[in-house]
């Protein structure tokens, strides 16, 4: 089989790495890919949002299956376009991707089908929203309806902060059209975790749990990023918690979507807040998480390609997955200054010091070649991912290996996985 992966981050590097292991696969292409991906797949210089260019490439190269990494092409309708051209593709179609593409859509769905989530109100009018928040006691969260690269969520600790957030989204259009509607919701306390669900729109399988670290600094302080590290499994997701997730969230979400005439095929990312064993949905995403995919796929023993193919064909047949024992962890190394402004083009000259193996893999995100050298090309640059017999030994292993490639030019958190150790 010839497989095309769309995207160019750490998630897509992990997808290519995992797909490449399948005996069913003869060639992997990645559009646009990055420097690390180019060592295991053929990178194609087509942007992830150039839907027509991607479709032409898939047709010309007789691609058997396309796996879509990021949300933008999904919400733009890449799956609809590929299917119209008889191309097999793994991912939800445009209507199903609204689950991530519109927070109003996803909150309304949860309310209608009694799926546990934060209480909320939706607004299009600044004055109405500003007057409503005056009645809230304690912190609350203001969210732009549409895609805003993870930046459209503002946690507010006072009415003044809320007014500022609403004004920037509704009046000043800080996130453009994505802010035409806003959701104001109750602030949830607890600990977050991520669950990926593979589904053909009826049958589903839950992958092992993971936990992201969204804040830039240690101890979850500072502004939110795309994710600074993740581990799998997440001990906060106990057997009881997982049963609740399945019964209270996954089943009613899939059924609810069906009742709305939507057949969701792909991976459904459920972002959870867990408080004293009770679960609530913080958000749905219509794709794999980044960086959670890196540790989740390293932990998975089964071949993932049959699952992708079955779902792309509309019929999930696989009913059991094998997982490696132990824990996996990914520590993200970012450009200094991220998530604010940062330089690009910084040379990474010590990457060869790392001895990679099945158990130690350096997934690239924002990297590219400049002649023969590899240079930075984005905020999140690398994600060193390892597996070991316990979370404590995995943490030790990942940081030992990071010290081999750490030239002081990149930044990383030093406490990834600590919360899991405390529970273990
Ligand atoms: P979202 O894109 O909706 O997942 O929000 C991004 C991040 O903001 C989440 O991962 C949480 O860390 C935080 N967040 C979002 N909604 C809430 C909420 N209702 N209560 C507390 N934190 C939240
Ligand atoms: N790691 C968070 C996300 O992928 O949205």
Image: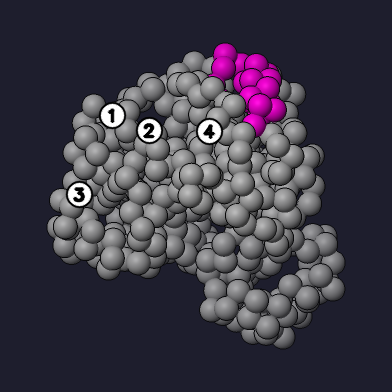
Magenta residues, start to end: 385-405
Give the mark nearest the N terminus, 1 or 3. 1
Main secondary-structure element of the magenta-colored stretch: helix
Residue named by callout 3: 63
Q: Are marks 1 and 3 in contact (CB under 8 Å)?
A: no
Specify whether residue 157 is painted magenta: no
Q: CA distance from mark 2 to mark 3?
A: 18 Å
Distance (Cα) linking label 4 and label 2? 13 Å
Which x, y percent locates residue 127?
Answer: 72, 85
**Residue drawn 55% across the image and 30% down it:** 352
Cα gap from disc 3 to disc 4, whole angstroms = 27 Å
Q: Residues within 10 Å of mark 2 (few under 14, many from 20)?
A: some
Is residue 393 in the magenta section?
A: yes
Q: Which residue is mark 1?
A: 22
Considering only order in the chain, which callout, 4 or 3, is on the residue closer to the N terminus? 3
Within 8 Å of ligand 2, the CB of disc 3?
A: no
Callout 1–callout 2 Cβ contact below 8 Å: yes
Report which residue position mark 4 lands on.
Answer: 362
The percent coordinates of residue 166 (x first, y second) are 71, 76
* Residue at 32 percent of width and 45 percent of height: 42
Q: Is residue 84 left or right of residue 248?
A: left
Q: State the mark number for residue 18.
A: 2
Residue visible at 37% across and 36% down in the picture: 40
Mark 1 C-beta to ligand 2 under 8 Å? no
Helix or strand or loop: what does disc 2 sit on? helix
- Quarter occupied by the N terminus: top left
Quadrant location of residue 343? Answer: bottom right
**Residue 101: assigned label:** none
SS at mark 1 in the image? loop
**Residue situated in front as seen by the camera: 246 or 33:** 33
């Amino acid at each position: 089989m010839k497989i095309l992966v769309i995207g160019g981050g750490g998630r897509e590097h992990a997808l290519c790495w995992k797909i490449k292991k399948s005996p069913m696969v003869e060639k992997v292409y990645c559009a646009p890919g990055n420097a690390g991906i180019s060592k295991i797949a053929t990178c194609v210089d087509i942007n992830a949002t150039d839907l027509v260019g991607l479709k032409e490439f898939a047709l010309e190269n007789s691609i058997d299956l396309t796996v879509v990494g990021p949300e933008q092409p999904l919400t733009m309708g890449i799956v609809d376009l590929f299917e119209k051209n008889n191309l097999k593709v793994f991912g939800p179609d445009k209507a199903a991707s609204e689950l991530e593409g519109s927070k109003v859509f996803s909150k309304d769905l949860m309310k209608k089908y009694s799926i546990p989530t934060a209480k909320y109100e939706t607004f299009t009018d600044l004055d109405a929203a500003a007057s409503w928040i005056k009645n809230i006691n304690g912190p609350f969260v203001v969210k732009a309806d549409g895609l805003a690269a993870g930046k459209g969520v503002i946690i507010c600790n006072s009415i003044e902060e809320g007014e500022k957030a609403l004004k920037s989204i509704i009046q000043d259009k800080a996130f453009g059209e994505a802010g035409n509607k806003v959701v104001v919701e109750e602030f949830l306390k607890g600990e977050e975790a991520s669950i990926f669900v593979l589904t053909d729109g009826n049958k589903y399988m839950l992958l092992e749990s993971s936990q992201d670290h969204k804040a830039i600094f240690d101890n979850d302080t500072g502004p939110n990023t795309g994710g600074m590290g993740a581990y799998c499994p997440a001990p906060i997701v106990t057997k009881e918690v997982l049963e609740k997730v399945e019964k209270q969230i996954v089943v009613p979400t899939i059924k609810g979507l069906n009742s709305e005439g939507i057949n969701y095929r792909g991976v459904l990312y459920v972002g959870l807040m867990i408080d004293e064993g009770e679960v609530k949905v913080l958000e749905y995403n219509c794709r794999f998480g980044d960086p959670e995919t890196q540790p989740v796929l390293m932990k998975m023993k089964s071949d993932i390609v049959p699952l992708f193919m079955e779902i792309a064909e509309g019929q999930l047949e696989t009913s059991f997955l094998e997982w490696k024992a132990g824990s996996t962890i990914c520590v993200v190394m970012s450009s200094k200054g991220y998530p604010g402004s940062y330089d690009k083009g910084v040379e990474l000259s010590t990457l060869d010091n790392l001895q990679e193996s099945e158990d130690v893999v350096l997934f690239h995100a924002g990297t590219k070649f400049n002649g023969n050298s590899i240079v930075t090309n984005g905020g999140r640059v690398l994600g060193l991912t390892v597996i070991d017999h316990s979370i404590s030994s995995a943490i030790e292993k990942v940081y030992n290996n990071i010290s081999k490639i750490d030239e002081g030019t990149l930044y990383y958190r030093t406490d990834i996985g600590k919360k899991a150790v405390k529970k273990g």
